[in-house]
Image (spheres, grey):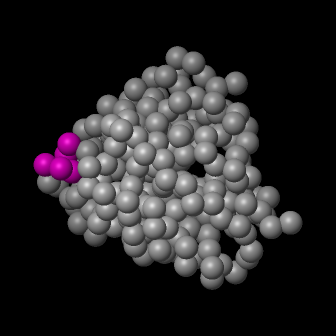
Amino acid sequence: MVPLISVIIPAWNESRLLASTLEAVSKAHASAKFSFDMQLIVVDDGSRDGTGDVACAWADVVLRFPVNSGKGAAMFAGWQAASGEIVVFLDADLGSTAEKFPLLLEPVLRGEADLTVAKLPPASIPGGFGLVRGLAGRGVRLLSGYDSGAPLSGQRAMRSEVLRRCERKYQGFGAEVGMMVDAVRLGFRIVELEVPFRHRETGRTWQGWLHRGKQLCEVGLTLWQCWRKPAC
């Protein structure tokens, strides 16, 4: 039986790169070395640049938030609309490198993993000082015992049961960290693998610092919630 894969892409003001990301996902589906049906879902998280209109040309489902509600809320809404037995989350700014997403599916389809997480190549320009990643990695290790090489990666595939069992509504940019902590504590198998995805890079700009500051706060809040109410 051919599996149904739901690919969910949260997007906020990503009209510049979203079309190339969605095109790459569609091409990858058509040319993959294994067969699967695909449901492509875009969650427009209160964008003001026409992101939702771009998504309509490619996606099977487009969800539109009237205001920006954060990445965690967008991921949750996408999952609620998903029909697939396997769910893939991808960031909207991957561009043509999104064509690599079937690599995340292979360990899940082979029954070797319940959740796969992409480890991306190093950034080509200097970014932050590792504070967010350090907090995320230490938090995951302390709360679950799992030593993650990519605790913040938004590129991941999982059996839908993982999301059903985790249940928690994760906060903003802490969603991936919280999901990893809960998945480990619930006994799911995680495989991290290198996939040559590329993001838009903000470097050491004011935009980049603001993004990383918000990320630090939301990761910290999510870790506190996971500690206060562990998954079981």
Which residue is located at x 73 percent, y 76 percent?
34
Q: Residue furthest right?
A: 1
Q: Quadrant of residue 157?
A: bottom right
Q: Main secondary structure of the magenta part?
A: helix
Q: Between 204 and 199, which is closer to the camera in this rendering?
A: 199
User: Image quadrant for the N terminus?
Assistant: bottom right
User: Image quadrant for the C terminus?
Assistant: top right
The image shows residue 70, relative to residue 124, as above or below, that is above
Horizontal relation, residue 45 to residue 178: left or right: left
Which residue is located at x 34 percent, y 43 percent?
46
Horizontal relation, residue 133 to residue 24: left or right: left
Q: Position of residue 148 (x, y in %)?
A: 53, 48
Q: Between 202 and 30, which is closer to the camera in this rendering?
A: 30
Horizontal relation, residue 144 to residue 4: left or right: left
Whether residue 150 is visible, yes or no, is no
**Bounds of the magenta span?**
206-210
Q: Between 99 and 103, which is closer to the camera in this rendering?
A: 99
Q: Position of residue 11 (x, y in %)?
A: 39, 52
Whether residue 108 is visible, yes or no, is yes
The image shows residue 199, relative to residue 180, as above or below, that is below
Q: Position of residue 178 (x, y in %)?
A: 52, 35
| 208 inside magenta stretch | yes
| 43 inside magenta stretch | no
Which residue is located at x 29 percent, y 53 percent?
13
Q: Between 144 and 63, which is closer to the camera in this rendering?
A: 63
Q: Residue furthest top?
A: 228
Q: Position of residue 24 (x, y in %)?
A: 48, 75
Horizontal relation, residue 1 to residue 3: left or right: right
How many numbered marks have been drawn onto this rendered protein structure? 0
Q: Quadrant of residue 143?
A: top right
Which residue is located at x 64 percent, y 33 percent?
166
